Image: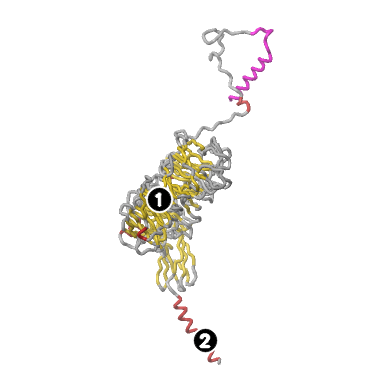
Amino acid sequence: MRRHLTALAALAGALILPTSATAAGAPQIESTWVTAVTATSADLRVEINPGGAPTTYRFQYLTLSAYEANLAAAKDPFAGALSAPPGGEGSVGSGSVPVERTQHIAKLSPSTLYRFRATATNEAGTTKGPVRFLGTEEPTNAFALLDNRGWEMVSPLDKGGGAVGSPEAIFGGGVFQAASNGQSITYSSADSFSEPKGAPPGSQYLSTRSAPGWSTENISTPLQAGGYGDHPDGVPYRFFAGDLSKGLLLDPNRCAVACLTSYSLRQSQSGSVSSTPQLAGLRFEGASGDLSQMVFGSDTGLHRWSGQGALTQISAIPGATLAAPNGAISTDGSRIYFAAEGNLFLAEGATTKPVDEAQGGGGAFQAASADGRYAFFTKASHLYRWDATADTATDLTPSGGVVGVLGISASGDVAYYLTSAGLFQWQEGTLTEVAGAANASDYPPATGTSRVSADGEHLLFLSSAPLAGSESSGLVEAFLWGPPPGGGKATLICVSCNPTGERPAGAASIPGAVKNGSSQLYRPRVLSASGNRVFFESQDALVIQDTNHRKDVYEWESSGEGSCRREGGCVQLISSGRSTTDSVFLDASADGSDAFFATDSSLVPQDPGSFDAYDAREGGGFPVPPNFIACEGDACQPLPEAPEDPTPGTLIANVGNPPPRFATVGKHKKGKHHKGKHHHEKHKGGRK
């Protein structure tokens, strides 16, 4: 029996040895990141699983320009790179669990981008880690906004103890929209100030810039109490023209049941108002950018209105709706896409055409070109482009797999869409991969956070995937795809990542269509017309001046755009980084030269405090008014009158110097003379 057990033990030992040997494999690099970045140094860090065999590691690093030069010459991208530890390799042991190692590197150049990677080697082979980036800081901590911007207080000093609101925070709504030229902005507040005519659920304001500064008008219309009910659907205003010359608002109505609804169009310059006819269940669904054509739904179908006169019916099909709140109406309002009974249609003049008929109906509208000629829709995971002129639809994705569309160009010749295989750009039949497994989920393009420049060359989107060499840690970051200023190859850049390359400490965000009650009709300009400026919010401190551990507003711009000359682009605060509450991005001008935000920081001397709207304006800032120094004590006495003759001591009568008058002793008032003497002395003391 004992011999039998011994034999079994020997057999077991023989079986265990090969199993242990085969467990050893090539090392695995679990993660690579950087910490403690300064202007001239950084700590490179790696986590390695040795794979059960003695394993060594090292870091390689070089400047971005050298890295790209190697790629252009078809060399190893890290050819000529420096190594750490210097002159050798470090050990991570021979275990089978991840081990962390850190190497400090110094003598880096300030304000410079680098690429680095870790490699791990054992008897089973060598593993190369992902390429990461680090960016050294500037050699100074002086705070300066990009593009020579200056802060200007937009909202008025006197708000009657009130404050500017935040998007979607006023009864679930609010309208915040800047004019395309940046010379004016409209915003909402739960408080009523600036010569109010009433106190609706949310008051609306229009601030305009002129040479002396910003002036504000309360554009809320008079109303009866309770006109919007106890629980209003957002703020009365619904939409403004691109130049803020007109604004559409819901009319108040104290009716309880079977209500007839109407809307009014207000002219900003004159204040004149025109109204739609009242109709049961009337609801605003969308408009052209200049508010020359508006689309309304009702219990009796779909209608259009030009701002005057009667409503014109588009469709009498019950339940017909505008295909999307943005993008379904052409720029001139001549083409309108709508959905009815599960199908898509185009209304063009008095003609109505089916859009998805060849596909058996059931299409989901995604976007349309500015002139309305091309419409993009999805069905059964396929993306189609419909040509209104040819009346034909083309399947852009024969293999299917489309998850969503992030946006299109104004002309309709470029579209960005997501599949399970990644994010792609379609450009007149040419397909380009933007990012693999981007997990971007911000669609549809009408309301989502993604943006596409008018020419289709730039795409801005959010993703929590580690793209473009970033270490996301599962947090959402903003990414920009496109060519640099002046042209060149399109690349993918993480615009909201910490410019040092360190792991994020908070997520980034981009506002989608701002919600106003049940409607979402306007998307703030976060991507400039050139595609080389981005505005975003971040919970992370991306620059050393951000010290408040709150959400702040940032600007990113490409190298060669504005004042940025840093390789890879520049990141800087738009808000102060010192506010006690979250700062909120509101909107920007089309070219990005004006960036509007709301903050509780007092960024100009005259701001007494509160939550205010500001403009970070290129070349902006108004002269600071001189401080009034209050008098104290004797200094508050009035100055004596100037003598009639500036030459003292003369008794000679001449022009401007009347003959002297002497009071008789009997009539002299000693008290008056005594008082005058002390009065003079007080003035002397006060003027010292």
Tell me which amino acid carries mark 1: Ala
Residue 578 seen anywhere in this rendered image of the structure: no
Quadrant of the image containing the N terminus = bottom right
Instruction: Please tell me how crowded label 2 is: few (under 14), some (14-19), or many (20+) other residues with Cα within 10 Å.
Output: few
Which image quarter: residue 652? top right
Q: Position of residue 306 (x, y in %)?
A: 41, 42
Which region of the structure is painted magenta?
Answer: 663-688
- Alpha-carbon span between mark 1 and mark 2: 78 Å
Q: Which residue is mark 2?
A: 9
Residue 670 part of the magenta-drawn span? yes
Q: Nearer the viewer, residue 39 or 607?
A: 607
Which residue matches tag 1?
328
Looking at the rendered image, the disc whose residue lies closer to the viewer, 1 or 2, is 1
Please state which amino acid type lies under the numbered disc 2.
Ala
The answer to whether 82 appears left or right of 223 in the picture is left
Q: Is residue 324 above or below residue 437?
A: above
Check if residue 468 falls in the magenta segment. Answer: no
Mark 1 secondary-structure assignment: loop
In terms of secondary structure, what is the magenta stretch mainly?
helix
Q: Is residue 84 above or below residue 252?
A: below
Q: Position of residue 477 (x, y in %)?
A: 45, 55
The mark that comes first in sequence, 1 or 2, is: 2
Q: Position of residue 30 (x, y in %)?
A: 46, 66
| SS for dot 2 | helix
552 left or right, relative to 74: right
Whether residue 527 is visible, yes or no, is yes
For the point 46% across and 35% down, the residue is 272
